[in-house]
Image (cartoon, coloured by chain):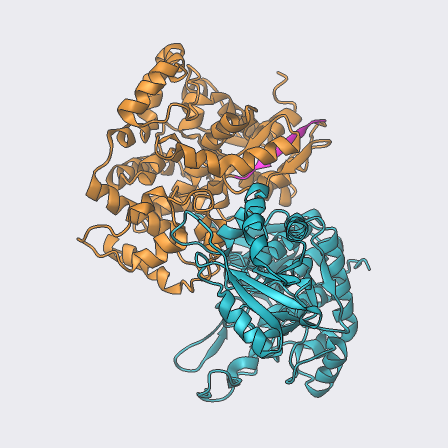
Chain colours: A orange, B cyan
Amino acid sequence: MSELIEVELLRGSLDHCVKCTICETACPVSNASPLFPGPKYAGPQSERYRVAGEPSVDASVDYCSGCGICSQVCPQGVKIAEINAQARNELKTEKGIPLRDRIITRPTWLGRAGTPVAPLANWTLRSKPLRILGEKLLGVHRDAPAPRFAGRRFSRWARGHASPAGRQRIVYFHGCGTEYYEPWEGERVVAVLEHNGFEVVVPKQDCCGLPLQSSGLFDEARSVVRRLAHALGSQLTDEHTLIVGNATSCTLMLKREAREILSLEADAELARVAGRTYDICELLLELHQRGELRTDFRPLPERVAYHAPCQQQGHWIGKPALELLALIPELDVHELNARCCGIAGTYGLKAEKYGIAMAVGRALFDQVGASGAPTVACDSETCRWQITHGTRLPSVHPIDYLYRAYGLGDT
Amino acid sequence: MRRRRYDVVVIGAGTAGLVAGTRLAEAGADVCVVAKGVGSTHLAPATIDLLGYAPDRVAAPMPAIAALAASRPDHPYALIGQTAIAEAAEWFVATAARGALPGYDYIGSLERNLLLPTAVGALKPSALVPETFAAGDSRQLGRLAVVGSAVLRDFHASLCAENLRGAGIDATAIALELELDRADTNTLGLARRFDDPEWRAAFSARLAPLIGSADHVALPATLGLNDPHAVLTDLEARLGRRVFEVATLPPSVPGMRLYEILRQALLAAGGRLVLGAGVVAHQRDGERVASVQTATAGSNTTYEARAFVLAAGGFHSGAITLDSHWRAHEQLLDLPLRGVPEGRQFVASYFDEQPLARAGVAVDAELRASGTANVFVAGASLPGSVSWREASGEGIALASGYRAAQVAAAELGAEVSA
C-alpha cells in the first residue's frame, strides 16, 4: 500500500462519523481548556476542509495532546486521534518546527548527554534560574516535571546480567525511561519474568520515535522506529519469542501508532514486531488465565491508587494491571477514574501547554488525594513523573508490587 | 497470540450490555464486557421508558406491556416476560440508589408513566426517571419557567415553552445571558460549570429575579456530572422553586451519569470492561460460538467464553447492516436475522414505520440466537420492536439485558442471586 492510499484510508474513516459527540465527552483537553475545541470539531469536521497543498484550516489542532482516548471511545471506528496527528504534522511542516521540539523529542540524545554528568544535569533541571532561562530560550515550562537522571544505564546492567535458560524467550523492550531514568524498573521487569520461567534477552535498542511523531516530526520518527523494529525484530528467531515492554506509550507506538499515523502499514518488519509485542501486564494476565503465572505472593498490607494512562488504554486490552494487583493478598487497590494526567509525553512540558496539562490532571490529582493512598501505580513513566509533580506522592510501575510480593527485592 | 478466557463475554457497552454484564458478575460469573466504543447511553435521555405508545399514549406501562405481548408474540417484551421486566426495573432502581452518584435516584413506577417535557415542548411518557427529571411531570406543573441561553445552541427555551403552551401548560421562556469562553459550547461544557458551587451560586443569583411567579423551573439537562443530587438540591434552595431537567441533544449529560452508574456497578461486581475492542472475527464449534476476536493494538485478541451476550445494537450502531443488494447482515457473529422484508421496501413518509424497522437477530423464547447454543441477545439487536415509536428502547435494553444474563447464568450453572 502506498503512503498516499494509507493516508486516504485513515481520512476515509471520518465518513463514519455520525457527530454523536461521544469523543467530546471523553476528551481530556477540550474539557479543561477552550483552546482545543474538541476531537470532533478538530478531527472529522475540520478534516473536510483540509486540502493538500493549501494552508491548514485550524491551528487549534496543535492543542490536541494525542492521548488517543477519542479513537478508543468512538463507537463508529473513526480514527480521530490519528487524523488529528496527521493534521498536526501538516501544520508543523507549514509553520516550522521549534528548536525546542527538535530537542525534547530526542530522549536518546538527552539521556546520553545527561547520564555521565547526572548530578550536574539533575541540578540544572532543578535550578530555578536555569529553568526560567530554559523557558525563555526554548519554551520548556519552568515548572514542568523533569525526570532525574539515574546516572547509570539499564543496558549496562543488562549486559552484565545472564538470564537463565527458560521455557520461552522474551525480548525485552525497555524504552528510554528505563534506560536513563528508572533502570531499577527494568531490573524488576526482568526479575518478574525470570521468576515465571522466561529467558530474557535485552538487545541494543533506541527510542521508538513517539515523541518525534507527537510533535509532528514524521520523517525523523519513521527512521527511528524502523531502526528499533529492526533491533527487536532481528531477535525473533523462533515463532514463540515475544517482545515485552513496560512503557505502554512506547509499546503502543510499536504495536499500532507508527504503522497508522506514520503510514508504515507496508513495512513488513514493523508489522511482524507489532504482532509480537506485548505490554508486560498484558502478558502476565494472559499467563495467569492459562494458570501459568506463579502466585507465590506474600501479603502487602498497604494501599495503592492505580491510574491507567491514556496510551495504555489505547492498547484496547482493558486494565490488566488491576487484575494482577488484585492477586496480591492484603493489597488495597483503589482504581482512579479520571482519564488523563495531562502530560501526554512531551505535551505538558511545553510552555504554552503546561497550564492545560495541569488543568487536565487536576481531577486525577484530586482523586489520588481522596484515595488516601501513599503511592500511585501507573504504567507509563512520563505520567508517573506528572503524577508525582501534581501530587507530591511517589509513583511506580505496577510491576513493582508483583516484584515485592514475590519477595524478589530481598536478595 | 493474545488470548483471554472468561465465563461470559458480553459484546456492547450500552445499557443492555452493561446490565447483562453486571447481572452476570453479580451471579458469580467471570465476565468481560468488550465494546468497540462507548455505547448508546451518551446519546439517549437516560429515562427508562418502558412503553410510551401502543400506538396511543400509554398511561400505565405494565398493563399495556401485557396487552402488547399478547398481540405481538414476536415483540421482545413477549419473550422477556412480565416477571423479568418487573424484576429488572426493581433491580435497576436499587442499583442506581446505591450507585456511583449518591442521592441521584431513579424514581417512578411501572404502573404509571410520568409525562415529561422534551426540548421541543412535547410531553413524553417515561416510567423511571432520574430525580432531576421528576418534578417535570406535566400533571403537577403549575406555572413553568423554561430557561435557556443563546450560548447553548442545542436548546431553545422559547420553542419549548411555546409548544408546552399549546399542550395547555402555563409556560414562559427565559433567555439568560451567560458568558462561556468556548466557541463550541454544548451541554457537557455547561454541566461542568454546574458542578462548580461558585458558578452555580452566580447562575442562581442571575436567574432568580427573572423567574417571576413561576413555581417550576425547567433547565436543559446540564445539572452537573459529579454530583447532580447536590446541584439539584442547591438550585432548588437558592431559587425557592422546584427545578427539573429537560433532555437535550447529545451529548446527553444524564446519559453520561447512567453510563457511570452502570459501569461502576459492573466493576464493583467484579466484571471487566474493555473499550476499543470491536469484534472482528469469531470461531465456531458446531452450534457453539467458541471465541471472538477483537481489534487490539498489534494483533487481534481471542476471547474464549462458555457463553456470549450480544448487545451491540442494530442498524444505528452498525452491528446490523443492509447493503445495496438488499442483503441484511449481522456483522459480528454472522447470526441469522428475522424481520427483513423481501425486496426493496421503503415507505415514503419519514415518520411512518419502515418495513425494515422490526428486523433484528433471530432468537428463541430464551433470547438465544437462532442456530447457536450459547449466544444470548439483548437490546437493540433484538427483532420485533420499533422502539422509537413505542418509546420502549431503554426499557427493552434494561429488561433484555437482565433476562439475557438470567438465561446465560442458568446455562453456566451459576446461581443468580435474587
In what quadrant of the picture does the C terminus of chain B appear? bottom right
Q: Is residue A276 magenta?
A: no
Q: Horizontal and vertical percent for residue A131?
A: 35, 19
Residue A116 horizontal side relative to residue A2, left or right: right
Using the image, determine if residue B113 lies above or below residue A360.
Answer: below
Residue in the image at 45% along x and 89% along y: B343
Using the image, determine if residue B236 lies above or below residue A398.
Answer: below
Q: Horizontal and vertical percent for residue A229?
A: 34, 38
Residue B130 appears in view: yes
Q: Quadrant of residue B417?
A: bottom right
Residue occupying the far left of the picture = A53
Q: Horizontal and vertical percent for residue A349?
A: 38, 30
Residue A314 horizontal side relative to residue B123, left or right: left
Residue B336 horizontal side relative to residue B181, left or right: right
Residues in magenta?
Answer: A300-308
Using the image, determine if residue B262 lies above or below residue B407.
Answer: above
Work out whether residue B3 or residue A146 is closer to the camera in this orientation and state it: A146
